[in-house]
Image (cartoon, rainbow, N blue to C red):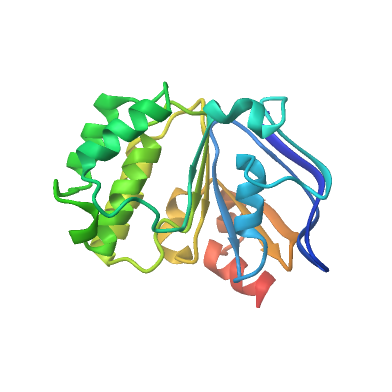
Amino acid sequence: MLAKLFSVTKRYGKTDGVHDLSLELHPGQAVGLLGLNGSGKTTTLKLLAGMLFPTQGSVEVLGQPPRANRGQIAFLSDADNLYAWMTPTDAERFMVGLYPDFNLHRYRELLAFLEVPKQGYRSMSRGQRARLRLAMVLARDARLFLLDEPLSGIDVISRDRILKSLVLEWRDEACLVLSTHEVSEAEGIFERVLLLKEGRLALDARAEDLRARGQSVKDAFIEVLA
């Protein structure tokens, strides 16, 4: 087992971001973390990344609290948060200084595959910015990859290249958790599907089992969450 949440509740004032949430993540899995807006997806990812602490319950990555294993966790926020002046080369220097596990060769290959231009971040399109931030995260030699809405609001070509890069960079020793609203486009890479509804786990299923009973991931999404 790579990571787990056990009976986790995260409270914001009088509202629960997630409530009594338990799940386990294992190496080799590509997990779709799905749900409507406000269902607890980002809260779950940030708890696993050690960016939030549970109000109740416990979170572990490789048997320890997430902050004790930050070097094994790669988190991609949905925020467009790089400095405007940064070029891909500046981003490379930034990541090398911050993460000893940053793989330069992989990063440069990803830049080429994702067709990230060499210009400054400010002058890139939204899709190009998303591809750069993804390359920065996937170039780490981490065990747990947490991606929060990497496909949101970007063009079809960028979404296609991002999904292909996730497949190409797949590592058996790692676990990928991808939160997305683009269910139809992304479901082909999911081995496992977690559906959250109002902060609770509404479905935990293998994508193969859903398909065996004639359901797509999107069908299950609509059935459980509508």
Q: Nearer the viewer, residue 125 or 200?
A: 125
x and y, in percent, of residue 219 in the image: 57, 70
Q: Measuring 33% from the left and 25% from the top, which residue is drawn there?
A: 103
Q: Nearer the viewer, residue 125 or 22?
A: 125
Q: Considering only vertical position in the picture, is 214 above or below 178?
A: below
Q: Measuring 29% from the left and 39% from the top, which residue is drawn there?
A: 91
Q: Considering only vertical position in the picture, is 95 above or below 21?
A: above
x and y, in percent, of residue 75 in the image: 50, 43
Count up the numbered dots. 0
**Residue lying farthest to the top in this orientation:** 100
Q: Nearer the viewer, residue 82 or 144?
A: 82
- Answer yes or no: is residue 138 visible: yes
Q: Measuring 57% from the left and 63% from the top, which residue is drawn there?
A: 214
**Residue lying farthest to the bottom in this orientation:** 226
Left or right? Give the position of 90 relative to 178: left
Q: Quadrant of the N terminus?
A: top right
Residue 79, quarter of picture: bottom left
- Answer yes or no: is residue 2 visible: no
x and y, in percent, of residue 209 in the image: 62, 51
**Residue lying farthest to the left in this orientation:** 118
Left or right? Give the position of 131 relative to 209: left
x and y, in percent, of residue 35 in the image: 61, 65
Q: Quadrant of the C terminus?
A: bottom right
Residue 111, quarter of picture: top left
